Image (spheres, helix red, strand yellow):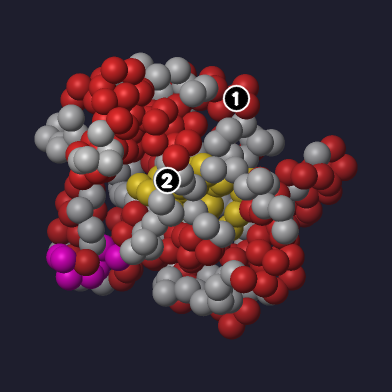
Amino acid sequence: MPVPQLIVVSLRGSGTPLLARITTALGYTPYGTMSGTQREHGEQPGPGEVAPLLRAAYGQDEAARLLRGQRDNREELEAAFQQAVTALWRVWWTRLGQPVTAASPVDPVLEDRLTRVPDTDLPRLLPGRGCWYVNSLDLERADAGFLRAWHSTARPPIVYHHRDVRDRIIEQIHLLSQPAGHVGSMPEHLVYRDIVSALPTMDAKITLALTDPGFPGMREARRCQWLLRHPAVCVLTHEELADPADGGTAETRDRALHRLLAITGHPDPAAALAALPNPKSDQLPPGVWRTHFSPEHERLLHQHHSDLLPPHPDEAAHTINSRRTDAPTNSRPASR
């Protein structure tokens, strides 16, 4: 049986919508940063999923009352269940170390009760099959109890999705150069849109991205380096998933998708691969940075961000061969 929950850490500018289409095709409803791609008719919770969440959120007596009265007042039951789901989503979001706003429609009493659910029991309360998309998983911000539970069980599985740092920079600049209504609602995007839009040339914008430590995505990438090295994490790159017309290959894509299917426990990988959508992406193609980076940009990149560059091909090949020998289920090619 496929695992019911999945966590995808996808760095900003990594072509996340392409991976989100793949996980949605595999039956996972996206939450978090990709919740805008959620299907109109999500998977409905089964009978075995409603009662446990109601008991955790409202207590045994109130949950029993709601369930007994569902024939006479189903709307009350559905409203109570949805309120509990919303509170549970916020609890999950907080445990993943993601920022939340102080003003929220979530009932603080429900949130407090669900916060006290043991970390090992929390994943079982989420209804349906969900995929949490986050831009980072910082070991200093994520909940310690969640990290300990994941260390012990490797559940939910974690996927780390990224691409060449130079392409991520160009993708971010492209986003931040859009009209005000197209950059989303993240505070750092709103602020840096103003900064990027005030710069006269692409050269100046790239220089800003390479020298400003607060430029969106750079600090996150550095704090996510542990995900590249942890043997229980499935690593995927945008280059691997790219359309052949953009420089990808069907063989590389299939190998990457097999790793994804293995970590999710999919029972029929061949059927799943055949049903997946076309890899065409709305993001800029891999290697677009070559059109924009100057020798000075390369110098700044190595000066400030050499630790984020993909490994040398010889080093990458040695790493891959070592992983194939020691832990074949976790082997993966390095990003280009």
Q: Position of residue 76 (x, y in %)?
A: 20, 39
Residue in the picture at 18% in, 25% down: 108
Please name whichever residue, 67 or 247, is drawn nearer the observer in this view of the structure: 67
Say if the magenta span includes residue 179.
yes
Query: Does residue 31 appear left or right of residue 25 in this picture?
Result: left
Residue in the picture at 24% in, 43% down: 74
Q: Amino acid at mark 1?
A: His
Q: Which residue does the numbered mark 2 point to in the structure image?
A: 45
Q: Amino acid at mark 2?
A: Pro
What's drawn in magenta, residue-wise?
Answer: 175-181
**Res. 151 mark:** 1
- Is residue 94 visible from the viewing direction of this image? no
Please name whichever residue, 292 or 44, is drawn nearer the observer in this view of the structure: 44
Outermost residue toward the right?
325
Q: Is residue 37 above or below residue 74?
A: below
> Could you classify mark 1 by the number of other residues whose Cα lies within 10 Å: few (under 14), some (14-19), or many (20 or more)?
few
Q: Distance from label 2 to label 1 (Cα)?
A: 28 Å
Q: Secondary structure at mark 1?
A: helix
Residue in the picture at 26% in, 25% down: 65
Please name whichever residue, 136 or 260, is drawn nearer the observer in this view of the structure: 260
Q: Quadrant of residue 148?
A: top right
Query: Does residue 330 appear left or right of residue 67 in this picture?
Result: right
Query: Does residue 78 appear left or right of residue 312 in this picture?
Result: left
Residue in the picture at 29% in, 17% down: 61
Q: Position of residue 39 (x, y in %)?
A: 38, 62
Q: Position of residue 169 (x, y in %)?
A: 40, 59
